[in-house]
Image: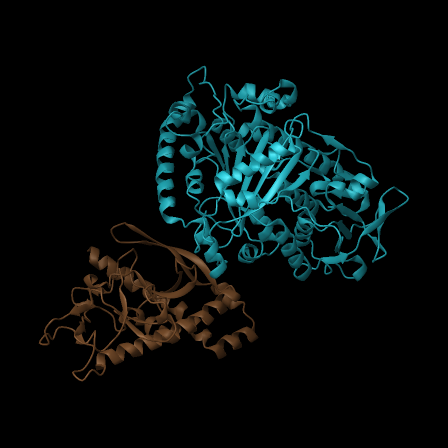
Chain colours: A cyan, B brown
Amino acid sequence: MNQKINRVIIVGGGTAGWLTAGVIAAEHCIGSQNSTQEDSFQLTLVESPDIATIGVGEGTWPSMRSTLQKMGIAETDFFRECSASFKQGTLFKGWRTGADDIYTHPFTAPQNYNEVNLAPHWQTAREQINFAQAVSPQSALFADKLAPKQISTPEYAFNVNYGYHLDAAKFAKFLRKHCVEKLGVTHIKANVTGINSADNGDIASIATDSHGNIEGDLFIDCSGSRALLLGDHFGIPVCSKSDILFNNTALAAQIPYTNEDDPIESCTLSTAQSAGWIWEIGLPTRRGVGHVYSSDHNTEERASEELLSYIASTVSEQAAAAATLRKVQFRPGHRAKFWHKNCVAIGMSAGFIEPLEASALVLVELSAAMIAEQLPANRGVMDLVAKRFNDKFLYRWDRIIEFLKLHYVLSQRRDTEYWRDNCEASSIPEQLTDLLALWRHQSPWHRDTNNADDMFPSASFQYVLYGMDFKTLPNQTQRRSERADQQRAGRLFQENAALTQQLKTSLPTNRDLINKIHTFGFQKI
Amino acid sequence: MSNYKILNNDVHKDLRVNTSRSAQLGDNIMYTMTFPMEFRDIQSCYPIFFCKDPESGQLYPAALLGFEQDQNLFLSDSGWDATYIPLMVRRHPFLIGFQADPDGSEAAIKPVVSIDSDNPRVIHSTGKDSDEGEALFNQDGTPSDFLQTSIGTLESIHRGLEHNKGFIAALLEYELLESFSLEITLNDGSNNQLKGFYTIAEEKLQSLDGDTLAKFNAQGYLQSIFMAIASFARLRPMIDKKNAQLA
């Protein structure tokens, strides 16, 4: 039980594996920790030379900026080598009525969000201006396909908050190079052929075809949805969430730009369909477009028709005709637990859900960060850390699922069975039902997300609720605090309008800034 | 807008250049690019900071002339009140051809002197009797002394730009630049905030090892670094100048 945890083995070399390796190696000095070689911390990633990575998650949260920065990555290199672009939020089309309705969920919180709740003050002006535009300049910026910063802004700094769109295959390669060359991660190319157990049921080593048995103290399962270690070996089951979130199939395509200098969207586009939605992600080199839908509500044929018709109308008939669709099936859900004995799953091995809020990569970041921070000192305390980890991530999965479901239950669409089924009370988690009842009378605010493990701040709930035309009734009583805030709110709305104008005239287009990053690079200062 | 044309002793034979200093002629600038080779002269008159080209984000050393946009405290009714005028100020209305020239792509290849014919300094004289400003060419078409001096200035700038690249790269490599903002309170109580400038990170400089210092010394960077630091002393006279204007 006093066995020190010095040898960490990651199984799987996709984005999840290399991102996990990078986050842990950025915190723990490999090879130089202690006086003797035997004691020193070692991180090894075992990657199959034969299995292609899925390349899930081409959109990140703003958290990726600090994740990359902590690893010692220059943002310029990341942009140049991963075909990265700026993401400032999501633009939703057709979710409310299925017609041309649009709303946005920007990454920047409403003005002075820590001090004033602008939502109740916006209610009186809701016919004149949509919520997101009234409280934050960001939606107007990505509507114009502008960048969130200038070339003179230092790396990772911003005018308005941002995350990234990236080429997942290039990103995994880029991280691998950095992890191996800069952070001292050992890279072994081998196929796992078996798992050798210790007396206590732990994994003692993994057997490989070309490198024999690889021993370790902690094994991180990044082997994708097969979950070689946590699933196949330990038999931890998947908790299906298909009763809440119906989407289980994706058709994906990569569409080139018509012209090299076509504008690049600086948000993710999400357009609702008859039984799912279509994503569009703009990279400098191509668009990533995909239709994620419920196979219980739609046929593959019809889903691909919808996708091709989307491509034809937003890009061109030729692009639609030339498109190759790749099909990915998944079971929406997550493992019953993520950390079992000396094995913890990160990435698709832990769970997978439709990419509606790009939760895949951020969960990898958060999981890896917790392991890096709380790496058990010895086997004796590992179970305690494992319990904390499981509690925290089960909580997080529940919140993600509720937040995704929120997008559906607020819809007024009843045109297909899919949308009608989505509003069936039996498909809605109880806590979400309760929150919606409460939000009829009070807008989401810091009190609604007071847990440090909450991934979506209350501001995100505000953007989705009011973007989807949800009505919060006025307070029953006259509130002194609200009267006091009223003037201030008016001033903030005006300031936001002024800031929006100022940023619209001073920020370059997304394409323009990305070109400049490739030519000049960002400064560190 | 600028309108650069390659200088030609036929087309431009009658052009003259006004060399006096005034806001009308475009001298009302808050700061200007400078080069280590002129730091010795610059630091005797102006504070040296570093700033970013908004188009590229690249850093360059700059001589500070004022505290706000379009303000040059060294300009007075009688001209430019300092013993040394920066190279980049003296170059107008000329440009050396292989600097970024938005109009002439072919000119970007070999070093040619261009002139901005829309620059307010350029006098488009019709007759030959005008003696306002400086002539560009002698009667026989050869460059005038004034033009030859200007070409010398352009050549210095060309070398200076190359030198700046190495100098800035070295400063960045050793993290010797840091951003700073300066709040200047004038006698009338008004505040001027200088933002977006960078300066030598002195703590980092003091912690450099001997080998690095020897390398910087051999490259000539060490002297430039200390001149930039010493130039801070020129801030006080600028504040005094501004206060005197307010009084």
Q: Residue at x 42, y 24 (%)?
A: A123
Residue B94 on image: x %, y %: 27, 71
Residue A107 visible: no
Residue B3 on image: x %, y %: 26, 64
Task: Pick the quarter of the image with the C terminus of chain B.
Answer: bottom left
Front residue of B133/A121: it is: B133
Q: Residue at x 60, y 52 (%)?
A: A70
Q: Would residue B130 be found to the left or right of residue B194 on screen?
A: left
Residue A101 on image: x %, y %: 46, 29
Depicted B94 relative to depicted A233: above or below: below
Q: Would residue B197 be found to the left or right of residue A276 on screen?
A: left
Depicted B184 relative to depicted A401: above or below: below
Depicted A34 relative to depicted B4: above or below: above
Depicted A254 relative to depicted B44: above or below: above
- Residue A188 location, quadrant: bottom right
| Name of the residue lying farthest toward the right | A199
